[in-house]
Structure formats: structure tokens, C-alpha cells
Amino acid sequence: MGTVLTRRTVGDLKPEEVNGRRALVRVDFNVPLEGQGDNLRVASDARIRATLPTVTELTQRGATVVLVSHLGRPGGERRAELSLAPVARCLEELLGRRIIFLSEPFDERALKLVRMGQPGDVFLLENLRFESGETANDSGFAALLARFGQLFVQDAFGTCHRAHASTVGVTDHLSPRVAGQLVERELNAFHRLLEPERPFVAVLGGAKIAGKLEIVDELADRCDCVCLGGGMANTFLLATGAEVGDSLVEPDRVESARQILDRYPDVLLLPADAVVAADLDANAKRETVSSDAVPPDRKILDIGPASVGAIVNALKGARTVFWNGPLGVFETPPFDAGTLAVAKGLADVTSRGAYTVIGGGDSIAALERGGLAGSVSHVSTGGGAALKLVSGATLPGIEVLDPATERSAA
């Protein structure tokens, strides 16, 4: 796995590989928007700011930069509310320079404009997912996209687990193929998770277990303790025979959850208690009950204090921690209390020298809400990509990049 994660980076490029050449840069501008119509604007520019070091390095080294990204899930259709035009305006402000936004990128006029570009110019193509060939990794669309570049830079870690035209197919036509600064930081962080200092503890939450069972299984095999919370824990509780009331569960996953519990009875830590209510309302009457005796008309909406204490205690003994997913219905206070308490525990163990990595939007939001955003070792920009990588899986968008040379690996 170490070899797979060791890739050439922008910093490894020789002058002749970048100066005067067009760099096609896959970025992650899948950002939240607010407002309507012509007043649409970027609500959070964190993902845009994360790409600035790579864009700046490339322009300073004489490249013409062509940025490509998706936004939302338009399903291969043009949707005005998912245009990258507001992103272009935001990027222009952040960079302090003109951005050439191509709203009709896949015609000869746009291609001619890019090829006439000068060193230091920055272009942004319209939402790639307006084209059905993007998510299908269509070879024809990948070849069309490749015409805009000469070298390829992958700086969108959050999309690297997807084999799409802009992450995999396009690399058949461009060289060199390197990691940008953002992806380089991510790969360095995950090196330490894949070869962790022990004890190694994982905290997994989120609403559903679908798509995560294999990851729980893999992590249970690699970790000293895997703490489960959120809606996904309910299915595991049901697998133990617990009464979970009217809580969110996935009955078709219960048998698989039971098999994982049987394999790793001393590794998986399930919630001991839960905060329950009849419905998801900030003013609903709530109570704390044992997680195996939830009343029939109540839903588990957060982990209880005993569960918080058990997770925080597990964190205290850890030297390496990975956390993905909230432990309750975080977006509706007061059902964010358990998640916020664990976030504080994570910050505490980081201050005592543990290496801690957090991924997933809601987990990151918990750190920010608690004023703890700078209090962990690494905040990953990828949720699904981070989960797959930490479980030991390879990412197609990383595998296609050039392996590091001896010089760059040194």
C-alpha cells in the first residue's frame, strides 16, 4: 500500500515538464451555494481555498492552468443552479486575478481559447457532470477532455475513489500525471494510518450502514478498537438482539452485521446508552435509556453519556485515531451533544501527542462548531475516499498517477 500511495507530485515536475505547457487540474469545487438565479454565490469557500497552493505553484512555474470539477449530481443535464459560474467569481476574488470561465467548454471555440492561453492564465470549465460521459468514464469524453491539457494534476482527493473520465480516463492521454499539493498532503496523512502507531482506534458514525459494512470489517481487522455510533450503530445493536424501538435500521444488513460482531467481539464498541425521542424536533421530550431497551415509540437520535465516556476512554489510550461520521443527528441540536463531546475528546488526545485524522463533512462541522478545527493532526477533504483508503482499499484516481521517482520519494 505504501508504494501505491507514493506518487509524483507537482513539486517533482522538471521545468520543461510544466513551463509553457497546459496543466489540466482536477479540483473539487463541489461547494455549497446559496441565493437564487444571478445572485447564486458560494456559501463556503473552504474547498476552493484548499486548491490555491497548487494553482499558484503551477502559474508561477509558467503553466497555463485548466481547472475541471463537478458540482452536485445533475445527471448529465445542464442545470443553471449547478453552474460553476459562482465558483469562478469566488476563485477570482481569492486568487486576485482574472479567471476565464468557459460556460460552453466542449466546442472548438473554447478549445482554441485555451490553446491560445498564455503562461499564468487560469481557465475553469463548466460543470463536468453536465456531460453524461463524465461519470460513465466514457473513453470518447475522456479524450475530448484531454485535448485541453498536456499534463495532468490530480488535486481532488474527494473524487479519487470514483473511476470517472476526469479522474481516470483522461490520464490515458496526458503525461506526466502527478498529485497536487492537496492530494500530496492527504497521501502523507494516510501513510501514517496504514502503518499506524498503536493503539489504533477508529470512530465511525453516520446515518446508514449501506456501503460501509466492508469498511467496518476491514477496520476491525486492523484496529485495536472500532467505536460505532449514529444511525449505522442501530443495525449492529439490532444484530445483538437489542430492542431499538422506532430507530432507523437496515434490516437487510443485520445478518452481515452479526457476522462482523461474531468475528470481532473484542474490537467493536457499540453504544451502551442512547438519547431517544418520539420525533426529530429540538423541543421534543427526550430521555436517556439503555441502548438495548428503547421504547417502541422512540427513536435513537444520539449516543448517551455512558457511550460518550466509553469512546472518550478508548481515545485516551490511542496513539492513532481515525474518525468519520457524526454519532447522532448532528444537524439538529441538542442531538449533537454526543458528537461534540467526542470531538473534544479527539482534540484532547491530539494535544497529548496522538496522530488524529478526521474525514466527512459532518465530523468536520462538529470540530468547527466546537471551535476545534485546528486541534487535530489532519482534516481530510474526502469522506468516501478517506473511508476506502483507511480500510486498505486502493483508489482508482491515485493508482493512475505516476509512481514517485527515487528523487521524489527520498
Image (tube, rainbow, N blue to C red):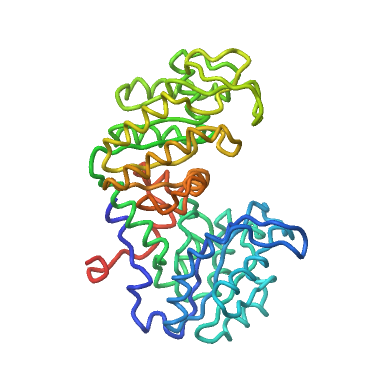
Q: Position of residue 188 (x, y in %)?
A: 32, 57
Work out which quarter of the rendered image holds the C terminus and state it: bottom left
Q: Please tell me in which quadrant of the rendered image residue 97 appears.
A: bottom right
Name above or below for residue 58 compared with residue 73. Answer: below
Viewer-proximal residue among 353 and 124: 353
Name above or below for residue 1 compared with residue 235. Answer: below
Q: Position of residue 322 (x, y in %)?
A: 37, 42
Viewer-proximal residue among 165 and 356: 356
Name above or below for residue 294 compared with residue 178. Answer: above
Image mark count: 0
Name above or below for residue 193 compared with residue 82. Answer: above
Q: Position of residue 360 (x, y in %)?
A: 48, 46
Q: Position of residue 57 (x, y in %)?
A: 42, 76
Viewer-proximal residue among 182 and 146: 182
Determine the residue positioned at 42% across, 62% down.
182
Residue 75 lies left or right of residue 27; in this view the side is right
